[in-house]
Amino acid sequence: MASTEPEHQHREDEEAVANEDEDTGAQVAPIVKLEAVPVSTGEEDEDPILDLKSKLYRFDKDGNQWKERGAGTVKFLKHKETGKVRLVMRQSKTLKICANHLVLPTMTVQEHAGNEKSCVWHATDYADGELKDELFCIRFASIDNCKAFMEKFQEVAESQGKKEENKDAAAAAGLLEKLSVEEKKTEDKAGEEAPVVSEKEEKETKSDSEKIEKKDEEPASST
């Protein structure tokens, strides 16, 4: 007995095609209209002074081993107003922040033992949304890139140190100037409040003083 299933399927296909060819005249508008949305990176007020491809690691104290933080671009960003510089690194695909900390005058960077393409440094990092003391190691594709990174790191750290010294010197100078002004005001005020002795009062004071001296010179009478 022959099966009627293929024939039945053929009729359904014809009906589906007929329905598809039928023009209802209806216009379907898109459900959601997408618009371009500007994305803020938080770097709009900063100028990049270095931008290199690299891979970042952090030292895991609990496991006593290096753990990869991500591969991407490391930058030194200088704030347009404050002049402060921070190190920022994002993963290349997700743009997730791997490192985010200020470069301070107390920081130093040195070559990682046995690898001229890597270097290490300590920092108080804020990549995870809270301050953490981290030991970082970064690896570059070439020795030249590693040297460029280390030189710029040291240059920035030293410049921040000079900036702090100048700031402290300016603050000290301002304080000294303020003290000098206050001292001058105090002297002027003391001069204004000093009593003025009239010529008459001066003569009377002199006369009283002479009388006291004459009395002291008289011999005591015997009894």
Image (spheres, grey):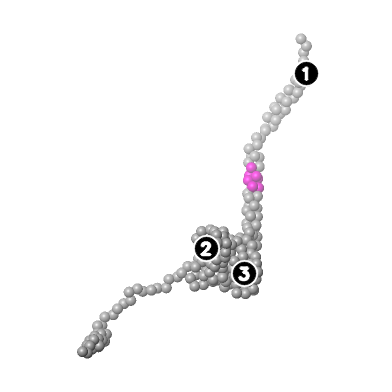
Judging depth in this view, the residue of 211 and 82 nearest the camera is 82
> Mark 2 — residue?
127
Marks 1,3: beta carbons within 8 A: no
The answer to whether residue 196 is seen in the rendering is: yes
> Mark 1 — residue?
218
Q: Earlier in the sequence, mark 2 or mark 3?
A: 3
Q: Earlier in the sequence, mark 1 or mark 3?
A: 3
Look at the image and give the residue range highlighted in magenta.
179-186
The answer to whether residue 79 is seen in the rendering is: no
Q: What x and y, as percent, mark residue 163?
A: 63, 60
For the stretch drawn in magenta, what is the main secondary structure? helix
Q: What x and y, as percent, mark residue 223?
A: 76, 9
Give me the residue at 70% from left, 27% from top. 204
The kind of residue on which mark 2 rests is Ala
The Cα–Cα distance between marks 1 and 3, rounded to whole angstroms, is 101 Å
* 221 left or right of 109 in image: right
Crowd around label 1: few <14 · some 14–19 · many ≥20 (10 Å)? few
The kind of residue on which mark 3 rests is Ser
Judging depth in this view, the residue of 199 and 185 nearest the camera is 185
The Cα–Cα distance between marks 2 and 3, rounded to whole angstroms, is 21 Å
Give me the residue at 64% from left, 39% from top. 190
Q: Quick check: is 184 in the magenta stretch?
A: yes
- Element at label 2: loop
- Element at label 1: loop
Q: Earlier in the sequence, mark 2 or mark 1?
A: 2
Q: Quick check: is 68 in the magenta stretch?
A: no
